[in-house]
Image (cartoon, helix red, strand yellow):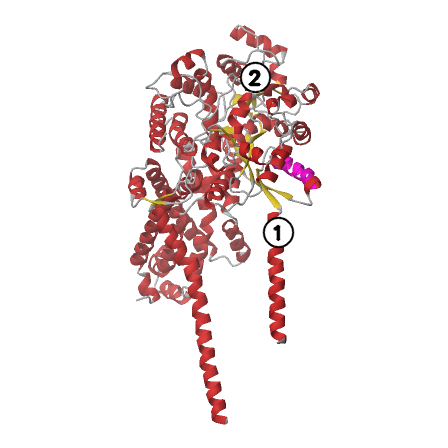
Amino acid sequence: MKNLFYIVLSLVLISCLGVSSIVDANETLNVGIMSAHGMSDSAQYVAEQFNKKYGDKIEVKVTPIGFELLLDKMLVDFSTGSNLFDVYSVGYHWIGQVGQYLADLEKVKSEYPEIVDPNYNEEDFPKILWETYATYKGKQIGLPFVDGTLTLFYRTDLFENPEYKKAFKEEYGYELKMPKLGDDPLTYQQLYDYAEFFTKGVKWSDGKQYGIALPAAAGDPLLSTFCCFFGDYRRSPEGIKEFGKVDPDYGDYFTEDHKVAFDPKISDFGLKALKDYLELGKFSPSPETLDWITTSEPFSSGLAAMMIGWGGYWPSITAVGSKVHNKVAVSLIPMPHLGGWNVAINDNSDKKKWAYMYMQMLTSKDMNKTLYKEFTETPTRISTMMDKELQKDNPDLWVMAPSLKRVSTRPKMAVLSKLEHSMGVILSKAWTGGLSPEEALQRTADEWNRIVKMAGY
Amino acid sequence: MSGLKRNYSKNNYSKNINIAKTVFIGIPLLSIILLIIYPTYFFIKIMLSRFDLSFMREPVFIGLTNFINIFSDIYFWNSVFNTFIIVVFAVLIEFALGLCLALLLGKIFFGGRIIKSLFIIPMMLPPIVAGLNFKLIFDTFGPINEFLKIFGIDPINWLGNPFWARTSVIIADVWQWTPFIFIILLAGLQSIPEELNEAAKVDGASGFNLFRFITWPLLVPSATVALAIRAIDAVKIFDVPFLLTAGGPGGATEVLSLYIYRATFRFGTMGYGAAMASIMLIGLSLLAVLIIKIINLSNRMGWD
């Protein structure tokens, strides 16, 4: 009898522990955030604020996840329904792959109207960011969290040196000048001339010197940077006439009727863009090896006069101790390219109400400013981008709003990773000399057509 | 009474035996079902299905379509070719270096233990660390190019040129895995009785003849085991190319494991990835059987 009592008691205790752990699990909102650019720090900071306010009901737990693993984790989590995270930071270019697993925020808002902040002000987000980050196939699937555009970083001590300015004018017949706020962006011809001048037109470094650090490593860097060159043709009046308008779900690489726009069989714009890209690459240290991180190395170590990289790299490039500390400014590249992230809710989550409340706090107007000040989290709101005081303290901020006025975008398609991979394998051969630019581009276009057709687009 | 007691304890004994049988057979059986049979069943099911994570929650049976598609997949064949090149060169160089080191260090007595321990360090490092390490070393502005500059040699585009990128992956693999071959061969060398060498010396055998007629024939079993294990392991190479070159440039270092990983998790095509993994598994099994046959390992180990 005594033994039976102990057995029953043990079972009751075990059940209580089990139930309490289930209760605990229900009260945690799990957030998976990319661990870079201060994104996870920002998410953690807001989680602390949120927990202070609602900690008696729910606790937000932020887990930083590396860029390389995040998409894999999301895909497995969503498709298996394991619900590891309620909220994810989603790169906008991944939306095509994971979009169908993200909750429709309009539905969440209509189900819980009481949680919608009347001062949230969606109008404060630039239209392009709302179109690319927040919507997919007509559904609202996220809130814009981190903006990212490819930006031109340059050495002020070189570009503002009167001696070099004079030499440049004598050589090229026009002023050596980087566009500032209100100026027109550079043309690719100017960028080419500047890069050539600082590679071989003037001696400004004791050792090796390069005009530009240009990313072209296989994968995301090649796909995004080539889009800057192709987008310049794609969005020109001639490009619009040739290809039609850009569909936000298909981006610059596709025509309005969803054909591969850089296909040499359709027009010669793709080839022109590739040749521009390859020509500029002559003034860069081995572009085919430069990814987002390694591109900043020759620039930070004082070997390159300019670099193309994400605006979010400003703090690390200009940090105290860097060889270019206090010698850097930013400007617009001829055709910027859009990166950036949203925050979205896993459709399998049973805590959509809390998830939306957290996301709303994370992307609110005031928080957008705070996160930029505290963590240099690249803002998504016009009010932060245009804030005069912030612009005064942060010399890189002014470039964000004008970049978004003319920006190229990647496709939001389920097969984007396959397209990126095939471009990395085939188009890269134009960089390594394995194929001529014509052949590399034609083969890439053929492969893209095959992949897109196989996927039923 | 004593008979009853005996009957009772006999019944009790057979009851306990039955419980023990159930526990000792049942638990391992359940473990096998959970850990081997079910995952294998799932693996087979997936490789015969279309299971695209981007838009499917359940696999759909498509028979052998994944396998048919693999045979026309240029990236698959490119990765098989890259794997072959890297494995052949890396393993042969590792073997040659490992053998030289074993012969050389086998005879060092003073400080031998410390030197041998130092040689083993690369093998102890996680491949991810080795990959990162070599990424810095082979950087355009890295130490190797700086070193070459001293001799007036132009910098080499280690990671941006297909030939040098493959070479870099091979060098990194050789650096990490030569110690493995070295350890096995050293053990093999130390197991050769010294009397044989002494007898050969008495008969007038020179240094090279000693190696050719005494050391090498007795070292063959250890050498073939080392080669076999290393070759099978090298086919699965992933971390170093993933970190060093990410498979580039132009797919020159995209090895089979890396492409399977991309197809499975990056493209989200689980079925296709599983089908490729099964081909890799069959290939590795054939390689293992072939090596076992060649070295007659089953006879040596008494498996027949």
Per the image, the residue denoted by label 2 is A203
Q: Quadrant of residue A129?
A: top right
Please determine whether, in this image, residue A258 is positioned above or below residue A115.
above
- What secondary structure do most residues of the magenta stretch adopt? helix
Q: Nearer the viewer, mark 2 or mark 1?
A: 1
Q: Is residue A138 magenta?
A: no
Q: Nearer the viewer, residue A43 or A270?
A: A43
In this rendering, is residue A148 above or below B11?
Answer: above
Please tell me which residue is depicted at 40% across the width and 31% down the height of the picture.
A419
Magenta stretch: give its range.
Answer: A40-51
Q: Write down the quadrant of residue A178 in the picture.
A: top right
Q: Which mark is residue A322?
A: none
Residue B185 position within the rendered picture, expressed as x and y whole percent measured from the top left: 42, 57
Q: Which mark is residue A23?
A: 1
Amino acid type of the residue tagged 1 in the rendering: Val
**Label 2's element?**
loop
Query: Where's residue B60, x and y in %?
Result: 35, 44
Q: Residue furthest bottom?
A: B1
- Which residue type does callout 2 highlight? Lys
Mark 1 crowdedness (10 Å alpha carbons): few <14, some 14-19, many ≥20: few
